[in-house]
Image (spheres, grey):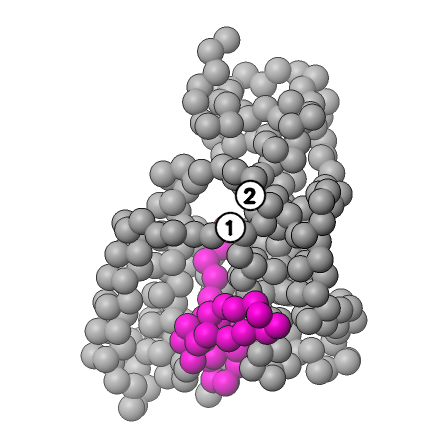
Amino acid sequence: MATDTLVDDIYHMIDTKEIPEGVPVEQVINDFGENVKEILRNNITEHEFDRRKLRMSNIGKKDRQLWYSYNGYKGEELMPHTRIKFLYGHLIEEMILALTKLAGHDVTDEQKRVEVDGIKGSMDCKIDGVLTDVKSASPYGFKKFKDGSLIDNDPFGYVDQIKGYAHAEGDTQFGWLAMDKTNGHLAYLKYDMADESQWYWTKLNFFSIKDRIKNIKEVVKSKTAPKRCYGHQPDGKSGNMKLGVGCSYCAYKHTCWEDAGLRTFIYSNGPRYLTYVAREPDVLEVDADGIKIQK
């Protein structure tokens, strides 16, 4: 089997309940159960986390964000509802891998440890021999896996992260198996760094992962922070200015935009971070700790 048919094969298995001959169904189910236990256990247990440490999972993040983290700036603590969102994201990803196995595809090298120039990480797996990261995504994020545009809009650094794993493994092909967590739709996006005929080839090979690692090691040791990763943008026709997606999810946004007097307003679709307010929003405002501001 090949990753080209992976999504259709999962859909077919779910729809028909037909599992290919030779698939160890009970073993897959038991492994899934044990992995779910471990995910839950990890999410209710305290863990030491060194923000100053460079990892394969963060080398794709923006330079300024890494500089704040490495230099000991205190980032925002995750809110309980955000921690729950991350928890069910991990559970979804584990479910997707189980479905992949039940659909007859070969899953190997799960959580294999790799290293490039002192930067360590654990890759998700290989599916049918192709290095693969498994992701759950919002509709906005899922679209980039579906149409292949991730390389043009990658605020979380997924491409550099998987390029690091690929370099360690000597692979040129890699991909993402993603699920839209709002509707269950699946997509498999695969890039090939060796195929010069592909539209994305130049962007994918603009710099090597070893160059990226060398650069960020120098950046984080600089005495001054790099320039801001993104500018702010208009908030509709209100005249207000807000942070974009890349900044909104950064734990250091209040430090980074302190000179702008960043304000947080809670809308029905989530928080909106305003750098300039021309028209006062008629919604709840909270401070950097999520506490309601009395007006």
Residue 215 visible, this angle: yes
Residue sitting at x 31%, y 59%: 39
Say if the magenta span includes residue 117.
Answer: yes
Q: Judge whether 133 appears above or below 84 on screen.
A: below
Type of amino acid at the residue the image marks with label 1: Arg
Name the side, left or right, on which 79 lies relative to 151.
left
Query: As displayed, is residue 278 above or below residue 37?
Result: above
* Quadrant assignment, res 4: bottom right
Instruction: Report the front residue among 190 and 185.
Output: 190
Label 1 with label 2: CB-CB less than 8 Å: yes
Residue lying at 59% horizontally and 32% vertically, measured from the top left: 254
Question: Magenta segment, which residues?
Answer: 109-138
| Callout 2: SS | loop
- Disc number placed over residue 51 in the picture, else none: 1
Instruction: Residue 284: give x, y in percent of width and height.
Output: 48, 20
Answer few, some or many: residues within 10 Å of disc 2's Cα (few below 14, many 20 plus, some between 14 and 19). few
Crowdedness near tag 1: few (<14), some (14–19) or many (≥20) residues, C-alpha within 10 Å: some
* Majority secondary structure in the magenta region: strand
| 42 drawn magenta | no
- When asked about the image quadrant of residue 73, the answer is top right
The residue shown at (62%, 78%) is 167
Q: Which mark is residue 72?
A: 2
Alpha carbon separation for disc pair 1 and 2:
7 Å
